[in-house]
Structures are given as structure tokens and as C-alpha cells.
Amino acid sequence: MPIDPFILLLLATVGVAALFPARGSVADVASGASTAAIAFLFFLYGARLSTREALDGMRHWRLHVTVLAATFVVFPLLGLAARGLGPVILTDPLYQGLLFLTLVPSTVQSSIAFTSMARGNVPAAICAGSFSSLVGIIVTPLLAASLLGGSGGGFSADSLLKIVLQLLVPFLAGQLLRRWIGGFVTRHKKVLGLVDRGSILLVVYTAFSQGMVQGIWHQVSPARLGGLLGVEAVILAVMLLLTWYGGKALGFSREDRITLQFAGSKKSLASGLPMASVLFGAHASLAVLPLMLFHQMQLMVCAVIAKRRSHDPRAEVTSPEPAAETRTAVGTGTRSG
């Protein structure tokens, strides 16, 4: 299976951080720049989401509630179940990162891309991913406070405020200004997509630079990484099966089941990275490592599933095509969601 070029850029960024970590005043500048870049990224998310599509998508409230339950209930339960694997398979820092992975919101762009590829309900995928991101801004820190506790890097009301200011406020600002800038954002989707990827790469560089300065990488061995990958593969397989067959048991249509599977089984790198940098501080590099690995795994596996779903003989030929704006949004979907 082909590897997303963005993943290669992520690995290259980790390598640069290992060889040339940011220190002192350079680290302060990099941290401030990554904070500003992520805020701008969520501002663009808000500007891209059509308010009309969001209101129309709310009619599928049963689907959205099911996606939220998969993201913020079933996923964390699987993360808690993995606690029994430590310390034989996972060290405590890796397990904390794995548990944090299960708490972050679902993706937006890649959920849309795979749902469109598989002939699913694209408007519902747009709304499901967006709702998950908004809910996650509040729910993820609260879950981290209750499940990770003090080991999570010091959750506090100040941490929640920082996340709200960095993610939610820019998103709402983008929504308010969409009337005037929405057309510009849509026309320059490819160019602004560089902001998506650049923001994430900057956060990765900052986090892994802190890890190198703190000297924490001696805690991770190849055997531990292999064990982590195995655990994540099991979690992803369980979620893919539960969302697909659970959707059937709940009576969802084929198109809605596709949306549920792709929106309910994935985790967002774009949302998880800035949250980890706030919640884990200097230990964010190990905290985001499971998320980075899971991100690549989910893209590769879901790409195969979406391709097979697109050739499903039971798919309706008259399945509605996504609107022009939606097709544009799908263009870079698997890159930074």
C-alpha cells in the first residue's frame, strides 16, 4: 500500500528534531509559532464549514450521537482495557500516550474523503467530523483529567482555557467570517492546505524537540514500538468492526454506515497534537507518538476499505454526488485530518 507523502514529512520532521532540536529562545519562538499556526488552522476549519450544511446535518442526530459515542465512550473503554498490557508490553509513558489517543476527537478531512470515495453520506461526514472536533475541545481535556490524572501532565482549568482559546475561538471566528472569506478559502483550497500540513509539522517539531532536550527517548525500544503497533492494530480492527456491524444493528442505511465507520473509527492528529502539547508539556513527544502511528495506520487501512466499498455491487447507482464545495474539501482529505 502506498504511504501518504505527508507521513514521510512527519518522519522527516522527527528526524530533524532529533538532529537539531530547538533550544532556549529558539524553542520559545517555535512554541509560539506552533500555537499561532494551529489557531489559524482551526480558523480555516471554521471558514470551510458551511453553516447550512451543519444545520442540514443535524437532522441525522442519531448518526451523530452514535459517532460521538464511538469516539468518546467506546474508544476510551478500549484504552482503559489496554492498561492490563503494561508494563510487559507497554511502558507507562507509552500507555499514557495510547490512552490519550483514545480520547481525542475524530478526523474531519479524511472522514470526508473516505466517505466520498466509498459513496457514503458526505454531508453527514462533514457534520459528524466537525461536531466531534467541537465537542472534543471540551470533552477530551475533561476525560484526560479523569482518566490520566496527574500523570497526564497537569490538567487544570488553565489548560482547558488554553485549549478553548487555541481551538474553539478561532473555529467560531472562522464561522462568523465565512460570509466574507468563505469563497476565498474555497478557491485557494490547495494553497491553504499547505497551512494544514505546515501547522502539524511545526507542532511535531516543537514536541519532539522538547523530548530530545529532556532525554526521554531512551525509554522507547524497538520491541516496545512493535508492541504498541500491535495494540493499536487491534483497537483499530475492533472499532472498524463495531462501527460497521453496529450501524447495521441500529438500522442505519448503507450510506450512513459508511459515515459511521469512517468518522467513528479514526482519531485526529490535527486536534490531538495541540491538546497534547498543552496537557503533557515537556513529555508531549511520547504522548503523541501513539497518535502519530495510529494516524498512519488508520489512513492506510481505511483507504483499502473505502476502495472496496466503492465497488460494492449493493451500492446505489443513484447515490447523491457531493456538492462542488464538498468535492473541493475532499481534495486534501487524507493529509492532515
Image: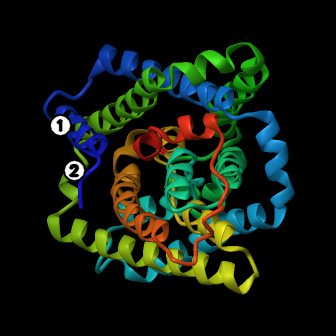
Q: Does label 1 or label 2 sit earlier along the sequence? A: 1
Quarter residue 162 falls in? top right
Relative to the observer, which residue lies in front, 66 or 216? 66
For this orientation, the residue located farthest to the bottom is 249
Q: Amino acid at mark 1?
A: Ala
Q: Is residue 88 above or below residue 310?
A: below
Residue 300 horizontal/vertical position (percent): 34, 61
Residue 277 horizontal/vertical position (percent): 47, 39
**Mark 1 secondary-structure assignment:** helix
- Image depth: mark 1 or mark 2 in front: 1
Residue 147 horizontal/vertical position (percent): 60, 65
Please give the residue where the numbered disc 1 appears in the rendered image.
18
For this orientation, the residue located farthest to the front is 317
Disc 1 to disc 2, C-alpha distance? 10 Å
Quarter residue 282 falls in? top left
Q: Is residue 11 left or right of residue 120?
A: left
Q: Which mark is residue 217?
A: 2
Q: Could you classify mark 2 by the number of other residues whose Cα lies within 10 Å: few (under 14), some (14-19), or many (20 or more)?
A: some
Q: Is residue 142 above or below residue 233?
A: above
Q: Is residue 138 above or below residue 47?
A: below
**Mark 2 secondary-structure assignment:** helix
Question: Which quadrant, please, contains the N terminus?
Answer: bottom left
Tags 1 and 2 touching, CB below 8 Å = yes
Q: Residue at x 56, y 57 (%)?
A: 115
